[in-house]
Amino acid sequence: MEVEWSLVWEIFPLSILAALLAGLVCPQVGNFLFLRRTGFYGVALPQFAACGVAFGFAIMPWWVAHVGIGGLDLDTALEDTHAAVNYHMAWAGVFTFGGLGILYLFGQKPGSEAARIAAAFALASAGTILFAHASPTGEIFVHELLRGSILVIGLHEFETLAVAFGFVALAMWWFQRGLLLVSFDPDTARVLGLGVRRYEALLVVLIGLTVTIGSLTVGPVVLFALLVLPPLAASHLARSLRSFRWISSLIGLGSAALGLQLSFAFDLPLGPTIVAGAGILLGLSLLPFLSLGKSRT
Amino acid sequence: MVVKTTRGSAKGILYALLTSLLLASIPLAEVRVVATIPDLADIVREVGGDRVKVTAIAKGTENVHEVRIRPSQIIATDRADLFVQMGLSLEHAWVPGLLTAARNQDVSVGGKGFVNCGEGWEALDVPADASRKRGADLHPNGNPHFNLDPHSGPHMARKILEGLLRVDPDGREYYEANFATYSKALDVALKRWEKQRERLKGHKIVVYHTEFRYLTKFLGLEVLGTIEPKPGVPPTPSHLIKLIESLKDQRGFVIVTAAWSNNRQVAELSRRTSAPVVELPGMVGSAAGVDTWIGSMDVRINKLIAALEKE
Amino acid sequence: MVPQTGSCLLSMTAASFGYGKQEVIGGASIAIEPAEFIAVMGPNGSGKTTLMRGVLGLLEARSGRVDRGDTRLGYVPQRESLDRLYPLTVLEVVRMGAFGRLRHWRTKSRGDENLCLQMLERVGLEGAHSKPFSSLSGGQRQRVLMARALVMQPQLLVLDEPTSGVDQAAAEGIRDLLLSMVREEGLAILLVSHQLEFVRTCASRALWVEGGRVTEKSKESLLQNGSVEALLAAGKKAAKEGIQA
């Protein structure tokens, strides 16, 4: 069926705004993952969030009986209610921040960071499958939630996304100087009196918040793509840190816009088209080098 | 003047006749219907005829528990006058999201344009503990695959008729006439299937998922086991070992599966037990030539006869 | 005892530093006055960097006392410790020197912008402000980091191996720049280096670090070629034997 463009804004305002907001904000967080050479966090952390959601599903019968989810019975809690969404986000958050904490602690020991993240990803993936297996709704319902289809985003989810991503964007702007210096040259940051541990903790909170909320609203795959691909594309084009940040967010925004266009024009699921959009823009960012026949160092 | 008037009256009568003929043959209203699965869409077409325009959400080849929503489907639901679902939690992973996104009060749960075919259907395998506290279960309200029950045609058609009458009462005569015609066709088909089942009674099968539970009951087939330990739960090693052990002494059975099942595990079981695999169409549109609900049931039963009579 | 005067920028009294359970420097006593050029030397792994980190406050003293008063510190890290993946321009790097003075959300102020350009001119990189930092040569990057440290408006500048891996001409340029800062502005410099020739031509005194102990060497002793070179060579030999063992 062909999608009538006149209806798109009327019916999908939340989906469009959520996609554009994610496209704008995720790359700002992804910039730090990229520059700190921890891009793999972008893969591992959404998987932690997914594992948390699956775990939440698995223990939901016990939780409803002993703790309670907004006074809901189990059947209602398994539906798409505000309290249930908050419950899933809380578990996603616990696992994301827990994963970040573990990676940070192990990061103090010698060894390969990439191997640590790969191991964490493998464990979180296995955990997701096993917990989903034990879920009272079976795996399919868990997978459906983890897909986080932006097309069917509810008002409560959108409000949560808007508040969380708004906070992340504001914090990224407000603390940009400290976050940059602490990442680039932590010793000089200390000499200048910037609280390195405080800024590191802030960055962990911002990454964790983005991943937790993003995983359940836009979905882990879209989140990973928007965290990693725009900074990678921007690194090919930017000639300063300022332009890197702008280009990265513009590419994120462009990926979302292109994804929306592809989805509505060809009637395709929105999440994968945003990833495809980001991939197209990444490919385009390489064109100047192909035409010059050389790559920048 | 008089002549003119007379000629004008004749023309008027002619126009009136033609118009009434056209009105009788071409339905005035177009009722926009969204059906969750192609089986329901086919029955809506049979009962609604030319007065309806139907969109099916799931494709015939898709796992109906797990459907990825596309923009056009949300728009179709937003514009729909009637939304028809199977219910019994068959589509519970994606229909709530679809209805929320579409924001169409008329077709929301409880709205006059919402048809839940599961309502009033006596489901098989309803869990004793409906609160789902006893572990994984994709079918918390009983087996929802009753579209695969040869008896379910009239029930689904009746539910759809009721829905159409609620949203388009002007088409009552038209819909009831179509319903009567379709009911006759269903009756003929049911008699045919009842006759065919005599050839299948007592034959043994193994299934992957429990989607064919109603069909196997109707046909009197003996189900030796399911590859999934519980609906929606992939097989565990111990379950597979137990299943293979239990099938050791069995002969002359076939493994029944659908396109969306994990057919690598089905193939492995087939290799270990030397039992042939027969893949049945899950829904209308799941294979070439499976275009109607009645036709899909014919294909299933004929395939089973061909496979089991060989054994 | 550490000699102290009223103008002392930093005094360290019987201070010890280390990592985890391991003590690397023990009982170090140093006093740094304005316009002093102090070199920190010693064999590899002797604790020079640990001492430098103690001076900068990057490591807390485990015992003893370090008094920095209100002294403004400037720091020039080893350029190779900074990741070249960051797409920073020269000016963006130099601006970081002013980050300690700015309000949270700002990355620059008009006054500091002029200061950054002045400091770039001072280190001989006028007109290079928009160039990518990562595209510069080793010596040029070192100058950029010095300009950044100068933007901190320090009274005591600490440099970690500033001439390591740069060519002779660039090293001489850095030396001249450092000496002019000491002479013209009374800036105190603490410089960690392996390069005896470089230290010999500019340091007013030297601290010798070996076996966790910090001892003072006079300029005169640095001029006695044989003694320090022999010590460095002995340190290298000991380190080599340690690795072989």
Image (spheres, coloured by chain):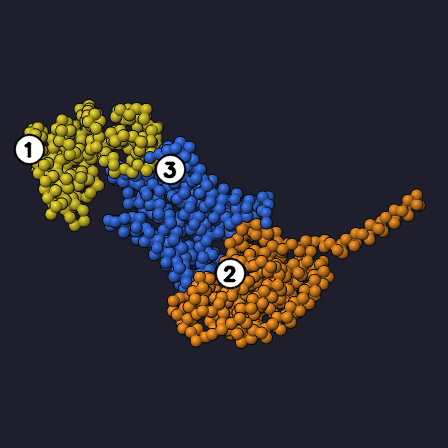
> Which residue is disc 1 drawn over?
C227
Q: What amino acid is found at the position of numbered circle 3 in the picture?
A: Ser
Residue that numbered label 2 is attached to: B259
- Left or right, C65 with respect to A143, comes to left
* Co-location on one chain, circles 3 and 2: no
Q: Residue at x 53, y 76 (%)?
A: B202
Q: Nearer the viewer, mark 3 or mark 2?
A: 2
Chain displayed in blue: A
Q: In terms of secondary structure, where does tag 3 sit?
A: helix
Q: On the same chain: label 2 and label 1?
A: no
Q: Are marks 1 and 3 in contact (CB under 8 Å)?
A: no
> Residue placed at 28% from the left, 25% from the top?
C125
Give the spatial CA distance, label 1 vs label 3.
51 Å
Chain letter of disc 1?
C
Q: Label 1 amino acid?
A: Ser
Q: Amino acid at mark 2?
A: Ala
Identify the image quadrant of residue C38.
top left
Q: Is residue A246 visible?
A: no
Colour orange, chain = B
Q: Is residue A198 above or below residue A140?
A: above
Q: Nearer the viewer, residue C236 or C35?
A: C236
- The tint chain C carries is yellow
Tell which subunit mark 2 falls on: B
Q: Relative to residue B142, is residue A213 depicted above or below?
A: above
